[in-house]
Amino acid sequence: MSAAKKKRELDLSDFPPGAVNEYSTLVCLACTFNIFTTQLGLAPRTAYSEIKKYSPTIAELTAPKAIPPFFDSEDKNPRCPYCNAAKRWHALLATFRIEGGKATDPARRRAIKSLPQKDHQFQVIEAKTDKRSVFFDWLDTLGHNLDIEDNSWLLDTTRAYLGRLEPKTDWDEVFKGVRKVRRSQRLEQSWNKVGARLFLAPAVYSEVLIVQYLVSRSHVHGGRTLEGRLTLPELIRRLRYGGYLDAKGISQGDQFEVLEQLIEAVAGGAGNIKVYYIVDRRAFLEKVKSAYERYAT
Ligand SMILES: [Zn+2]
């Protein structure tokens, strides 16, 4: 990687893994200039200064399916799906969402303070979102980054969930040499490592099973967990015998109602948390300038 490119990248290495979600989308500036000049009737120069100020909404920046003038493409040389404009008209907008909370607040304050202030190269947006959707985004990212057929999958998902529970622990260090994860009734803390075995307290172990089930249930019949492949009724039965349902006050309802309550428990309860979006507008601003120069001549 070149030094210039490295310098451009946001350093988010201070954050616990899983606390930052990254989104990127392309915006077509040919479409955008067209909206401002043809539809809104602005002169190119005015359109240019309006577009520079333009702040897309969080929904536009993070939508799973982009809406015009935004689009997503994996192609090396994509064309705008709306107007067929070539790559030189496309600008990339990268957005980082940081979960608020004690584990991330100091690093987030430092990261935001270090951003260049000039020309609104970055935009920071505070928002509230419910814990459940943050949890599902986390699950989604986890699922994308893991190979369910790989044997290390069970350890990787265990580590990921523990990282979410206890962000301050150096889990890479703890997991060095770990081969097996076991449940232990005798633990006073949430986990303990003995040789190649990592022991988890019953509640933590149960939650790891729930997370593994949720990540893998769309891939196979049932979900793949430390206890083997489990269908939803099998998972619930194990959690019931293991005392987890009683401990969390979950006992009522059919399997889907129970599942909803399990999700709420591993998502950290009901309610909202604060999230912070950092929008990197640098590439956008550069492209708007060159697109304007092209557009105006
Ligand atoms: Zn276009």
Image (spheres, helix red, strand yellow):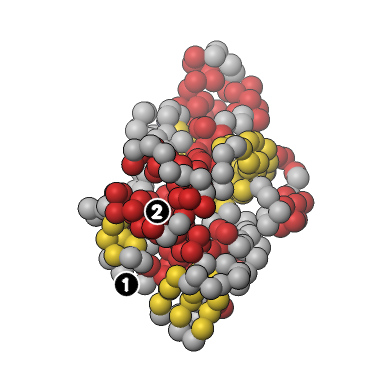
Q: Tell me the residue at 57%/67% (across/down).
A: 190
Seen in the image, is 13 located left or right of residue 224? right
Q: Hey, what amino acid is under mark 1?
A: Asn
Confirm whether residue 94 shows in the render: no
Query: Looking at the image, which residue sits at the far left?
Result: 221
**Disc number at residue 151?**
1
Q: Hey, what amino acid is under mark 2?
A: Arg
Q: Position of residue 223 (x, y in %)?
A: 30, 55
Q: Looking at the image, tell me whether mark 1 or mark 2 is earlier in sequence order.
A: 1
Q: Find numbered disc 2 in the image and state the secondary structure of the residue it sits on.
A: helix
Q: Position of residue 207 (x, y in %)?
A: 46, 57
Quick check: 78 above or below 212?
Answer: above
Q: Residues within 10 Å of mark 1 (few under 14, many from 20)?
A: few
Q: Find numbered disc 1 in the image and state the secondary structure of the residue it sits on.
A: loop
Which of the 4 quarters of the picture holds residue 259? top left
Who is closer to the viewer here, 215 or 81?
215
Q: Tell me the residue at 42%/60% (across/down).
A: 242
Mark 1, ligand 1, within 8 Å: the answer is no
Seen in the image, is 290 located left or right of residue 142? right
Mark 2, ligand 1, within 8 Å: the answer is no
User: Which residue matches tag 2?
Assistant: 240
Q: Tell me the residue at 46%/80% (across/down).
A: 197
Who is closer to the viewer here, 259 or 51?
259
Who is closer to the viewer here, 201 or 118?
201
Q: Tell me the residue at 46%/55% (across/down).
A: 244
Q: CA distance from mark 1 to mark 2?
A: 27 Å
Seen in the image, is 196 located left or right of residue 116? left
Quick check: 211 above or below 129?
Answer: below
Quick check: 245 above or below 40?
Answer: below
Confirm whether residue 253 shows in the render: yes
Q: Position of residue 157 (x, y in %)?
A: 43, 63
Q: Residues within 10 Å of mark 2 (few under 14, many from 20)?
A: some
